[in-house]
Amino acid sequence: MYEIMSADEAIRLIRDGDCICVNSFVGIENPVELHEAIYRRYQKMQSPRHLTIVSSAGFGVWDENRNAEGYIREGAVDRLICGHFGAMPSTKKLVLGDHFEAYNLPLGCISHAIRAQAGGLPGALSKVGLDIFVDPRREGPGINRVSIDDSLVKYVEVDGEEFLYYKLPKLTLALIKGTAADLKGNISFDDMFMSGDALSICQAVKANHGKVIVQVDRLVDMPARPRNAIIPGCLVDAIVVSEPKERNDAYTALTGSFEIPYKDWDLWNDRIDTLSTMEARKSAAGNIIGKRAAMELRVDDIVNIGIGIPEMVSRHARKNGMLDNITLTVESGGIGGFPVSGECFGAMIGAASVYDMANQFDLYNNGGLDICFMGALEVDAEGNVNAHRGQGSFAGIGGFANITAKTPTVVFCMTFNTKGLEVSQHKGVVKIQKEGSVPKFVRKVASISFSAKRAIANGQRVLYVTERCVFRLTPKGLKLIEVYPGVDAQQDILSKLPFQVEM
């Protein structure tokens, strides 16, 4: 039977050595009060300690002084297993400094491994991850030198087919953020951007005789409609009520609390402060790439669009009238709306449906998308892509590996080089005013996020769209298939590549 507790009381349920599973998505829907209560307790008692934290999509609020950053920084955590680390600025620095173990697995594979554990299975099989960095035959999932656990990902063969086997440690404590708890402890997510892995996490933790702590905005007298109660009260041990800060109506719109007509999607998106979108919108290169990439869309396509430059695809799909004829999706479980970027990435404007994250990755892993648009840090001579780890920095693979593994058409949206690149376009003519100092096309990528060999074997169509040209993946590597007006193929493209391409 659940109990209503303060955050400080609830955190006493955590024991040294617990494996905590956090339900959040990058920077949204974090149980912030619970994390900060852990920090307070750790400062006073140096406990809980020796924690392992698992999160499919990562957890953080883009602030190194809030959420879990404090107790991670002071040594309460021995091990992190996450799909994405982008919203945790100080934690990323500690990881690169070898302060504790940290592992990066594809987001969808963690989600499915959680669901498997909820069903009494030790792990989950997947073809996602074969021949990329997480494959133990290559690098494995460890991010730094102290991360040497080889039990998380194994290469196996079943009935003559290759798979990776993803296995998580036993989850013993759940930290969840919900909207409301009724008198029976049932938890609804009505005002949330997503529900993520919430139910599977709770089922797995209870199967392991652990504790479930849920932070909610309010208590309600009337029980939730059965279909709206994502977590049944019988799975909950502690409920912490933390009244949320007032949101402006732009953010409230993302919860689906009221209908947003298609014609108003752009208006609402403009009202949400998303730095990455604003930067891309002001970028001439981003606009050139987005406009060209959007030409690959077809009526009735089911689509995923990554953050950064790929976001410009949806902008140009809106301008050319195609947006109303396709279905956009986002990894957190949203379908049929307009994905938001920046600090609220994972939410959707005007979503038709938001379901469990594991179900979304069922769709992605099995080739349910028609096309996806992804960013890239590096591309090499074979067509391999590094999208998760830069020089001295990393964010993590996130859902990238799942999305690109089987989607029939994969379009990488990237500038030819970066750091100082200046381009302009006038009446369709592109002018390279200044080259960037950091090339994006390299002989060999530092780490593989997307395997060209796998894509060829799967029969995928792969394009690399830049601000000056388009390449296509072939069994021999890259082929230059399009040069924009105003661009000199030899001077502006071929002479700047460290390898030869087909023409």
Image (cartoon, rainbow, N blue to C red):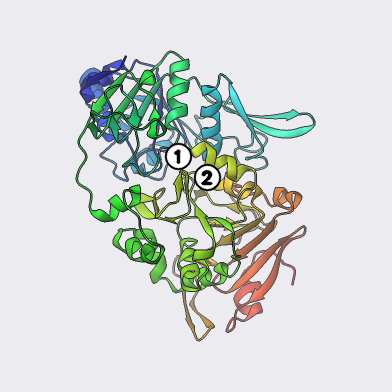
Please provide percent x and percent y for residue 460. 70, 54
At x 67%, y 38%, the residue is 127
- Element under label 2? loop
Please provide percent x and percent y for residue 429. 54, 84
**Residue 133's quadrant in the figure?**
top right
| Labelled disc at residue 496 | none
**Front-most of 262 and 146?**
262
Residue neighbourhood size for the residue with mark 2, other residues' Cα within 10 Å, grouped as few (<14), some (14–19), many (≥20): many
Any part of residue 427 in sight: yes
| Labelled disc at residue 57 | 1
Quadrant of the snapshot with the N terminus:
top left
Residue 468 in the image: above or below residue 75 = below
Q: Amino acid at mark 1?
A: Ala
Left or right position of 160 against 12: right
Left or right position of 171 against 445: left
Residue neighbourhood size for the residue with mark 1, other residues' Cα within 10 Å, grouped as few (<14), some (14–19), many (≥20): many
Q: Amino acid at mark 2?
A: Gly
User: Pointer 1 and pointer 2: residues touching (CB < 8 Å)?
Assistant: yes
Residue 502 in the image: above or below residue 381 = below
Left or right position of 474 against 394: right
Residue that mark 2 sits on: 399
